[in-house]
Amino acid sequence: MRAEEFRQHFPGLVDTVHLASCSQGALSDRVREAMDQFMESWQQEVAPWDQWMLMVDEARRQFARLIHANDSDVAVVSCASEAAFQVAWGQTYSDARDTIVTNDLEFPSIAHVWLAAQQRGAEVRFVQDVAGDLTVEAYQNAIDERTTLVSVPLVSYANGMRPQVRAIADYAHRYGARVVVDAYQGAGVVPSNVDDLGCDYLFAGSLKYLLGTPGMAFLWTNPRIDHPIDPVLTGWFARTAPFAFTPRVLDYAAGARRFQTGTPAIPAAYAAAAGIRLINETDRQVVFTHVASLADQLQRGAEEAGYALYSPTDPDKRGPQVAVLTPDSEGLGEFS
C-alpha cells in the first residue's frame, strides 16, 4: 500500500495536519467502521461474548504479526504499566542478583513500576543519557553480574531517540540478565522484529502509531525463557479454562496468556484489530523511510525557524517523532 492510498483511510487529514501521533494516532475509516461494528453487535445481540472474544484474539494475532512473533507468546493486557508490572514481578531478586537497569529517558509510568519493585528487594540503577542519547557504553557501565533485568525503549518518549537495542541486549545476556523493550513510541512505524531485537519481553499499547484507542496493550514474552514465579496480578483470563468458572482452582495458562488478568476492553480490541491490520497491509520499512523523510523536513523547518532540536538529527538514531527544546514547555502544551 502506497502512502497516497494509506492516507485516503484518514478522512480527517483532508483539512487537518495531525502532529499528535506520539500521543494519539489519527482516526482511520477502518477503526471507525470497527467501532460501529462493535456498537451494532451490542445493540443487536446484547452480549455476544463469543464474537467479542474472537476480536480480542484477532487483535492479539495482528500485534504478533507486527512484531514477527507467534500469537501464543502474546498476552493481552490493559496498558503498558500492567505489562511492565508483570515483567517486574516475574523476576527473582536475590542477594546475588537484584538489579534493574533502566534509564533517564524511560517513560515515567514504566520507571515507576521498576521503582515499585524495590518492595520485592530490587535495586534500581538509572543509565544517564548523554546529550539526549542512551549509548551502548552507558548501558555497559551499568550492567554487571548483579543485573536481573534491563529496560530499553525502542524509541524514547522524551526526544524520539532510538537506542541500539540489539547491542545492549547482547551485552546484558552475557551477564545472564533479561531484556525488556518498551516499544510504545515506535511500534507501527519502526520495524520491530523481536528476533532481530534480541529481547526477552516487549510491550506496546494499541494507540499512538498502532492507530487504536486507549484501553489495550500487548506483552510479548520470549518462548525460550522460563517463568519461575507465577503472576500475583491475575484474573480469570489467565486460567487454562477461563469459562470453567472454578473459584477454587488457581492454575495458569501456557505461554504468555498466564500474564493476562480480567475481562479485556472489547471496544479497544475492535479498534486495535482494525488499526494494526491496516498497518500490517503496509511495508514497515517503506513506512519508516517515508516518516523519516517527513521528520527530516520538519527538523529543517524547525531549525530555520530558530528552534533548538532535542531529537537526533541522524535518521538512524531517531524514531517517528521530532522534539524541540523550549523554555516554556507547559505553555507550549497549551497551544492549539
Image (cartoon, grey):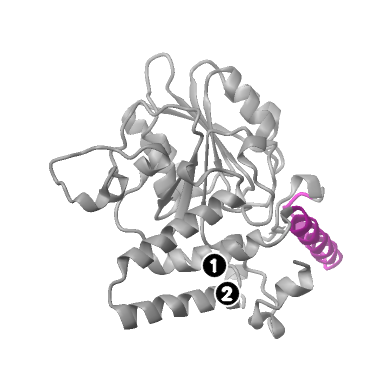
Asked whether the residues under the numbered discs 1 and 2 touch, taking CB atoms below 8 Å apart as contact, a structural biologist would say yes
Q: Is residue 311 magenta?
A: yes
> In the displayed structure, would residue 93 be above or below residue 11?
above
Label 1 SS: helix
Judge whether residue 23 can be spotted in this image: no
Is residue 246 left or right of 39 when viewed as pictured? left
Residue 35 location, x and y as percent? 46, 76
Which one is nearer the viewer's eye here, 31 or 114?
31
Residue at 33%, 64% (x, y): give it.
Answer: 50
Residue 297 location, x and y as percent? 84, 64
Residue position for label 1? 274
Q: Main secondary structure of the magenta part?
A: helix
Label 2 SS: helix
Residue at 39%, 79% (x, y): give it.
Answer: 39
Residue 73 location, x and y as percent? 47, 41
Residue at 87%, 65% (x, y): give it.
Answer: 304
Q: Amino acid at mark 1?
A: Ala
Residue 88 figure quarter: top left
Judge whether residue 182 can be spotted in this image: yes
Q: Which residues are magenta?
A: 285-312
Q: Which residue appears farthest toward the left when viewing the image?
A: 248
Residue position for label 2? 30
Residue 23 location, x and y as percent? 57, 64
How crowded pointer 2 is (Cα within 10 Å; few <14, some 14-19, many 20+) is rated as some
Q: Amino acid at mark 2?
A: Arg
